[in-house]
Structure formats: C-alpha cells, structure tokens
Image (cartoon, rainbow, N blue to C red):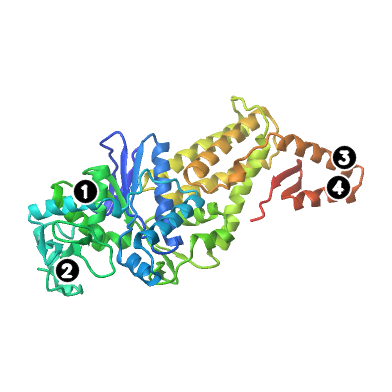
Amino acid sequence: MTIRVYNSLTRQKEVFENKGNRIGIYVCGVTPYSETHLGHARPSIIWDVIKKYLRYRGYKTFHVQNFTDIDDKIIARANAEGRDPLEVAAMFSHDYLASMDALGVERADLYPKVSEHIGDIISMIESLIAREHAYVVNGNVFFDVASFSDYGKLSNQKLDELQAGTRFEVDPDKKNPLDFALWKRVKPSEPAWESPWGKGRPGWHIECSAMSLKYLGNEFDFHGGGCDLIFPHHENEIAQSEGATGKPLARYWLHNGMLSIKQAKMSKSLGNFVTIKDILKEYPSQLVRFYILSSHYRSEIEYHDEKLAEMRRGWQRFNDCIVNLAGLIDNKEIVEQELHGEEAVLADKIQKAEQEFIDAMNDDFNTALAIAVLFNLLHQVNGYIALGYHTKQADYVLAEAYRVFTTLAGDILGIIKSETRQLTGLTEPLMELILTLRTELRNQKDYQLADLIRDQLASLGIMIEDTAHGPRWKFKNDR
C-alpha cells in the first residue's frame, strides 16, 4: 500500500520511498519568547499523527525539532524585562513542551537548541565561505544568493524577479539586497559568541541547516513547517545546505496551512492568539485535536470562539458510541467466532472502514477523510447495536469495532477521551443488575422508583434508554 505525499519542492504528489531503516523528520520548531498558542499546536499535532501513522505502517521514525533560542524577539523581551535571553527562551520552551504534553503530542526524539550548536553553525559557515557561497564584511557573514543557481526553486520564484520586486532593507554591506545573514556582528545588549569573524551570533536560517544536517545527515526524508516558512526561511535553508554539501537537504517538503483568527494568521507578533492553557480550561485536549485534524493539513483553517463548541457535538457522539461499545464488551471473554448474518455484514464494514482509513492516510495524510470514514463506521455500528443482539458473535464483532476505533481514532489520531478507553471490569455486570432491578420495578408499576434510578444514574453521567429490545445504557460525558 503506497503512501503518496504532496512535495512542496516539486508541487505535486509523489510516492514516498524510504531509503534507510528509519524515517528522518525535521520540523522547524518555535521561537520561545511568549506563551504557546493554538497556531503552534497545528503543526505539532499534524506531525504527531504522521509519525504515529508511519509507525502503524511498520516504519521507524526519528524526529528532530529545534528551539530557536537565539532571536531578535527573545532578546527584545529579555532586555525589556532585564533578564537573560537564554533564561527567557528556556522558560517558554518549557511552556511549549508542557502544552504539547497536555495535547497528547508525543515528544520529538531530539529538541536541539541554537545556543548549544554554535560550533556546528560556525563550521558550516566556514564551508560556505570556502565554497564561495558566502562573504565576510565588517564582522558580518552573508550568503551570496547569486552564487546558488537554484535559488527560488522551493518558492517557485526566479532570482531576477525577486530582485526586481524586493522590499528588503538596503544594507551597504550586502552585494545584493536578497543576500541574507549567516553571522551577525555583536551589538550592544545582545548575547554574542566568539567566531573567526569576531564576536557575534548566528543568523536565523543557518541554525536549522546546521542542526538538521548534524542529526539527520544529507537527504533525510521529511522537512516540515508552516507554509509561511517556505520563503525566505526554507528557501534559504536549501541554498545554504546544498551550497555547503553539494547534496539535497531533504527529499520531501511538507508545509501545513495557517491557522487564523478573523482571517489573519494566528501569531504572537500580531497579538491575535489563543494560548493552549486558556483553551484547555474550556475544552478537552482530544476535542482540540479533532478540530485540527478535521481539515487537511495543507488547508487554512479559521478559529473563532464558537468553533470548538460547534464541533463538540459531533465529537461527543463519536466518543459516546465508543463508550457504549466499551460497556457492551466490558468483562466479557471475547473469542473469535465464525460470523453469519448481520454480524458478518458488520464485520465486512469494519474491515472496509479500516482499509478506507489507511487509503485516506496514504493519500497525503488526509486526516479529514480518515475521520469521515470513522464517522461512517460509527453510524453502521450504532445501527447494529440498536438491534440489541446478545450473542458470542455479537460480542466478537463489537470487540472488533472497538479495536478499530481505539487503534485508529485513539492510538493514531488521539481524538478519543482517555476515560473512554478505560474498561473497569465491573461496569457491565453492575449495570446489568441495575437494569434488571429497574425493569422489575416497572413491571410492578413502581414507576416512581424506576424513574428515580434513571435520574440518579443520569446525575452520575450514565444515560438509560428504553428501546423495543429492552433498556440499554451509555455514558454521557459532562463535556
């Protein structure tokens, strides 16, 4: 089963081919100068799901995501607060990791920091100077864009058109306005490190190139980030990396769309962001993931205050179904059965849904379509449950449905509430006893006591439904 991905470099879908025994992934991380917001969550959740799906398909992954802990915005905040820039960066890096933990995002294998890789960055700049892709002026080192003939291939722009339309600040030290800094000479009130060109600090773009090459080598599999990074950041990464090594940096470039508020990109610099801490005070983390994954990763999505509230109803129905499944098979010995009739029909639908989920994810990690597949299966399973069968065959096919939901929606997508998956072992027999008692009370026309049992269970989050096949129960989450 072939995986196809949309490669921003070639602007087309391509068959994914893994050349090694693991899949190397580099995703541009955050610049930690403020609290983590929902815009940060989107790429993190997307790559969390991609990694988990790849492992589900039998691959091994190695994920590197940097912290840009040397940056103008970090320095500005630190100076304004009279603090050390690295202290500010460390505090908000911790905030990012804690926020991602709360969202169920599996941590990367490595989180390299720029401040810990100055030597690697200097070595790479020296290689670029030696290959005549960079030049030194007054303690600054610039990349010579004209020296790299493929400049613009990621953003699909031509160098002469970029030069004609440039609005880059004129710097008398540059040969070309498009040339970008690899090393910046020291300025007052800024952190600085020793280098062959004098004290200073690295430029933004060189940082990611040095760290990705150090840990993943040339031609690693996936390079990810937001579409706002295509130009100039990723374009410059390609130029300096290929300029230094003569080999491609990454084979597949995947860019997620922006998350916006009122049609403006959600960002700290614009001040229009919702922090993860604030949003998780109101909504479960799995619902936030559901919201993010209900759109294809390359599409732009818009957030407003009512958005998650609107999506909660569908997400809750989905979780209610899985809770109901858990209750129906709880504490039962599930043995594989030869299926016939309705059970065979449902088993076929479950198998088909599992394959359709795989097909959706194989098609450029289409989580939106994958979720639609699971909702379709939800309706089919609910229809079967309504028939009220209580046989070994029914138990087996429902256990299969539960397995598929918890594997695909839980282990891979992470959109199932944690309590949904916790089978107590006592729930089913206790509820059967209570329902038997309530049925007996109704037969004796003691409706007042029967209704009292129903109402008390409702207050505990358990709903009783009286059907033509007898009473049944399900959990009702308070969210």
Dot 1: element: loop
Instruction: Tell me the residue that label 4 is attached to.
Output: 450
Instruction: Tell me the residue that label 2 is attached to.
Output: 162
Q: Quadrant of residue 219?
A: top left
Could you tell which of marks 4 and 3 lies nearer the N-terminus? 3
Could you tell which of marks 3 and 2 lies nearer the N-terminus? 2
Q: Going 38% across and 65% down the picture, which residue do you hit?
A: 83
Give the class, few, some or many, for how many residues have Cα within 10 Å of label 1's Cα (few <14, many ≥20). many
Q: Nearer the viewer, residue 158 or 269?
A: 269
Q: Nearer the viewer, residue 397 or 234?
A: 234
x, y (%) of residue 192?
24, 61
Which three-letter amino acid code belongs to the residue tagged 4?
Ala
Q: CA distance from mark 4 to mark 3?
A: 9 Å
x, y (%) of residue 42?
42, 56
Mark nearer the viewer, 2 or 4: 2
Mark nearer the viewer, 4 or 1: 1
Instruction: Tell me the residue that label 3 is attached to.
Output: 440
Give the class, few, some or many, for how many residues have Cα within 10 Å of label 3's Cα (few <14, many ≥20). few
Mark nearer the viewer, 2 or 1: 1
Q: CA distance from mark 2 to mark 4?
A: 76 Å
On screen, residue 343 versus residue 467, left or right, reads: left
Q: Quadrant of residue 114?
A: bottom left
Q: CA distance from mark 2 to mark 1?
A: 23 Å
Quick one: quadrant of the C terminus? Answer: bottom right
